[in-house]
Amino acid sequence: MTDQTLTVRFFARLREELGTEELTLPADKDQTAGDLLAALASRGGPWAQLQGNQPVMIAINQAMAKPGAPVKAGDEVAFFPPVTGG
Amino acid sequence: MTDQTLTVRFFARLREELGTEELTLPADKDQTAGDLLAALASRGGPWAQLQGNQPVMIAINQAMAKPGAPVKAGDEVAFFPPVTGG
Amino acid sequence: MISIQTEDFDCAAEYAALRDSGAGTGAIATFTGLVRDSGDKQDVSGLFLEHYPGMTEQVIAGLIEEASQRWDVRKARVIHRIGRLQLQEQIVFVGVCSAHRGDAFAACEFIMDALKTSAPFWKKELSEAGEHWVEQKASDVARGEAWGK
Amino acid sequence: MISIQTEDFDCAAEYAALRDSGAGTGAIATFTGLVRDSGDKQDVSGLFLEHYPGMTEQVIAGLIEEASQRWDVRKARVIHRIGRLQLQEQIVFVGVCSAHRGDAFAACEFIMDALKTSAPFWKKELSEAGEHWVEQKASDVARGEAWGK
């Protein structure tokens, strides 16, 4: 059910190194973006870098967010390196 | 003799109000741009404004100068209002 | 107006459109970014640009809105290219027209600076030696923060 | 390169010439000033611009030289029109290309600000009510002085 899941997207270096563009995950209750990041990092291997030395930026529903921001079913959560356009 | 004279030029509002674009004047010894301005202002009428309330800018040989700067034979001295280009 | 596109853009057409903004316009400031031969590393031969579709447009719209609140902005135009770009190709265009010179410069530079640190674009530099993702520069972050709020 | 001219100029051609400045160029900033309908007074219908031939070019060359010492300037272009101009005609163009964005913006804005307070041009506003010489603005003097030395 879409209602009980959330979408996670990765961009740029993270997308490449994780070999993943998008995930659909069950939406846990009372979860923050930081919780989600920790859960993904615990997968190990390249995923560990999500809690490594390099900063990971967070967007929730296409707006920049902090690790403490809550995420819920139906949300689009994105993780990416600091931006370098222009 | 050109050697014993200097050229005075006026621009913009001053040129219009003095009805004069250019003058050739005898070059006095030990004269400053300010002396020249005072001498011209003493002609009275519209010339008095050269020592009036409105600022008068000075250029000697096409470079901005102060009233205390010396002027000598052969120089081109210009008097004009503050610039307003761009 | 905001465009994110793979194709090149025509600064002349953009300038003409900016200029057509009423008799009160007195100043047009533009900025164009080009692919340089030296970035994080030397001998760069091109770039690959990735973005976050949707979020990018929202972020840039927010920057234009903020600029319009802080300065007199009659018209603002942002174009950013994505995909693969060769050396000296145009990457980004920011154009602002305003009644006043200071406002045009400030709004244009603000949008450009803020775009660099807040719009979700990522640049990969390509060279004979391989390719690598560009790191965000502390100097860019400092320039973005200098605009305050 | 510096041009003082009665005829109009083509920003597209100027931009193309600026862009053609080597693989190290990463940033082009331009400024164009247009005749506005409200200056010192309202309902301005045009301008008359007078200058001091010779001195004007020397002053602007000095400003470009100063900008080149303070910032990375690969190429700089200044065009200023003189004579009679209609509403919304182009008055002035300043374009700078540089390796870096901050340098391009700073050099372009510096040249424009300094030109306004040091290059010998004088503007007369024309309107149905008559004509009058424009007064120098304290805000322009302040902007010029803010660049320091």
Image (tube, coloured by chain):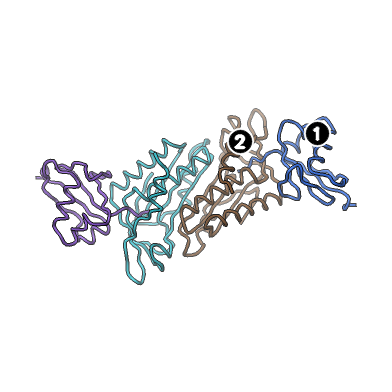
Chain colours: A purple, B blue, C cyan, D brown
- What x and y, as percent, mark residue B68? 76, 43
In the image, taking residue B83 as reference, residue C24 lies left or right, namely left
In-front residue for pair C88/A77: A77
Chain letter for mark 2, please.
Answer: D
Q: Which residue is mark 2?
A: D137
Instruction: Give the vertical position of D115 relative to B39 (above or below).
Output: below
In the image, taking residue D1 as reference, residue A33 lies left or right, namely left
Tell me the residue at 63%/51% (across/down).
D60
Q: Please, which residue is most extreme toward the bottom here?
A: C128
Q: Residues within 10 Å of mark 1 (few under 14, many from 20)?
A: some
Q: Please, which residue is most extreme toward the right here?
A: B1
Q: Specify the quadrant of the image occupied by residue B21.
A: top right
In the image, taking residue C122 as reference, residue A27 lies left or right, namely left
Q: Could you say whether the residue bearing mark 1 is in a helix, strand or loop?
A: helix
Chain letter for mark 1, please.
Answer: B
In the image, taking residue C28 as reference, residue C123 lies left or right, namely left
Tell me the residue at 56%/48% (across/down).
D110
Q: Which residue is mark 1?
A: B47
Q: Quadrant of the N terminus of chain A?
A: top left
In-front residue for pair C60/D63: D63
Tell me the residue at 52%/35% (across/down).
C24
- What x and y, as percent, mark residue D109? 53, 47
Instruction: Give the vertical position of A82 relative to D22 (above or below).
Output: above
- What x and y, as percent, mark residue C6? 34, 56
Q: Amino acid at mark 1?
A: Trp
Q: Could you say whether the residue bearing mark 2 is in a helix, strand or loop?
A: loop
Q: Amino acid at mark 2?
A: Lys
